[in-house]
Image (spheres, rainbow, N blue to C red):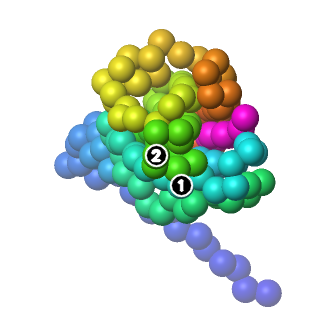
């Protein structure tokens, strides 16, 4: 049997600025958030009416959610900002329609939820409320009865619409 001699090779480069290389690699690091969205309410169909990204972007679409169906759209962002975003689903577009709002921040590990009558969303207000929330938020609309549950755990989030 022949003997194999293994040679160790140096990977050190005395001219390399390792701190700079680490910072450069960190600036290119990306994260992907999977957000399960589900319609467990009375409405036969919910459709997306708005999304907002403070940081990050969508990498998949937002399908209509039929009753008792779910979808898992994905979002992507770079570090250290991560992904900070919100979405709005509604059961129609007339004055009797309801909306469900959820927002998430991967860096802070926070989720925010609200529900109510159809109308514009003030994303500045949502951002403030998201910053004051925890990793799970449940909101019940006292007028229209819609319930939104938003929760985030690492790079997995849930937005459950019911009521």
- The residue most toward the front is 95
Measured as percent of width and height from the top left, residue 98 is found at: 55, 38
Circle 1 is placed at which residue position?
A: 47
| Image quadrant where one finds the C terminus | top right
Q: Which residues are magenta?
A: 157-163
Is residue 78 visible in this depiction of the protein? Answer: no
Q: Residue at x 52, y 67 (%)?
A: 7
| Image quadrant where one finds the N terminus | bottom right
**Of label 2 and label 1, which has the lower sequence position?**
1
162 falls in the magenta region = yes
Is 69 placed above or below 27 here?
below
Q: Residue at x 46, y 22 (%)?
A: 130
- Mark number displayed over residue 94: 2
Measured as percent of width and height from the top left, residue 44 is found at: 70, 55
Q: Nearer the viewer, mark 2 or mark 1?
A: 2
Q: Would you call the spot at circle 1 few (<14 residues within 10 Å), some (14-19), or many (20 or more)?
A: some
Residue closest to the eye, 46 or 156: 46
Identify the main secondary structure in magenta. strand
- The secondary element bearing badge 2 is classed as loop
Is residue 43 visible in this depiction of the protein? Answer: yes
């Amino acid at each position: 049997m022949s003997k194999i001699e293994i040679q160790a090779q140096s990977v050190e480069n005395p001219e390399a600025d390792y701190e700079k290389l680490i910072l450069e690699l960190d600036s290119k690091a990306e994260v992907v958030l999977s957000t399960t969205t589900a319609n467990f309410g009375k409405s036969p169909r919910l459709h997306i009416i708005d999304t907002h990204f403070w940081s990050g972007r969508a990498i998949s679409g937002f399908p209509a959610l039929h009753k008792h169906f779910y979808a898992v759209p994905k979002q992507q962002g770079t570090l250290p900002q991560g992904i900070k975003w919100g979405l709005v689903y509604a059961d129609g577009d007339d004055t009797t329609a309801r909306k469900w709002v959820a927002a998430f921040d991967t860096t802070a590990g926070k989720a925010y939820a609200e529900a109510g009558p159809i109308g514009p969303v003030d994303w500045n207000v949502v951002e403030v409320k998201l910053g004051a929330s925890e990793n799970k938020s449940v909101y019940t609309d006292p007028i229209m009865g819609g319930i939104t549950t938003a929760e985030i755990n690492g790079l997995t989030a849930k937005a459950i619409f019911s009521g």
